[in-house]
Image (cartoon, rainbow, N blue to C red):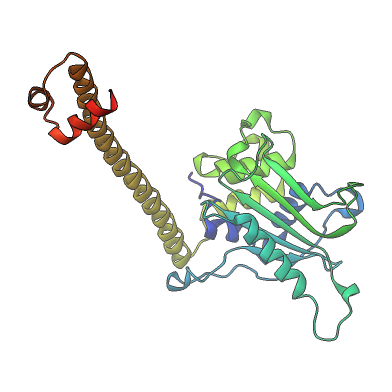
Amino acid sequence: MQFVDPKNDLAFKKIFGDEHKKEILISLLNAVLDFTGSKIIVDVHLVNPYQVPKIADLKETILDIKAKNKEGEEFIVEMQKKDLGDFSKRSLYYTSKAYVSQLGKGKDYSNLSKVYFIGIVDFTMFEGESFISRHLILNKETLKQELQDFEFTFVELGKFHKELGELSTVLEKWVYFIKNANNLTMIPKEFENSKEFEEAFKIATQYDWDIKELEIYDYMTMKAWDEINALKTAERKGLEKGLEKGIEQGIEQGKLEIAKNAILQGLENDTIAFITALDINIIEKLRGSQQ
């Protein structure tokens, strides 16, 4: 059995953005946001439920997930594999845009509800070793969260290193699933007896995916590999060019050192030029600098 990579944008949206399988998203939200007691989300309305995108429109398609709970609070979940720069600013932009869009013309500000942004990233964003970080607006003096309508949570997959036998929370299981599902060949026993995880793994088998979904998933996977290979090729060529330049610089520096020593030994300029293949003018400047 082979599972898809949940980090693939299409797979992530299909697993967590299906309005008929909302229990998967609800479980993820409660785990990531550490909701307990009265804060536990029991139901959500998907603002942008999963739909199969068209390959031609992929550049303009944003495969994030937007949902609301019964209190009107909004949740934005985005999976980001590549570090394209300024993801933190992008997070602020999407969150503020969602917040402002709640207020129709003539409505009262009291109608505005809290917006939670969850960014799951496959690169490093912040200092520190923790794979999850929460960012709030705090009073600098009292450290109280008096402005409460914005909250950001980031999960950095590269900082998560636990193995299957070490998983102890629902959050750790979701992070492990997102990071490692495509490397598994069967559902681990640690994920059994959980409807949410069983459904997530079932979707990840692509068993009920249609031809268009399979085509787009493969296209996005190949595109990602092409970008990785292009980057590696650019890095290799850059390294080769750098080494070549470094060797040339090293040879040139060696010639200069030989010329300096020859000057100290009292050799004539013509003789030094013959030995080093340096221009006479360069040797003259070296001689002048040593006087």
Q: Is residue 16 visible?
A: no
Measured as percent of width and height from the top left, residue 235 is found at 35, 43
**Residue 222, placed above or below residue 105:** above
Rendered residue at 19%/31% (across/down): 284
Q: Residue furthest front?
A: 291
Rendered residue at 27%/38% (across/down): 240
Query: 212 and 133: which one is in front?
Result: 133
Q: Is residue 35 visible?
A: yes
Rendered residue at 44%/65% (across/down): 211
Measured as percent of width and height from the top left, residue 189 is found at 64, 35
Rendered residue at 44%/63% (across/down): 216
**Residue 139, placed above or below residue 114:** above
**Residue 167, placed above or below residue 41:** above
Q: Quadrant of the C terminus?
A: top left
Measured as percent of width and height from the top left, residue 29 is found at 74, 53
Residue 275: image quadrant is top left
User: Does 263 sit left or right of 181 as displayed?
Assistant: left
Numbered circles on residues, count? 0
Measured as percent of width and height from the top left, residue 49 is found at 65, 69
Query: 37 and 107: which one is in front?
Result: 107
User: Does 40 sit left or right of 171 as displayed?
Assistant: right
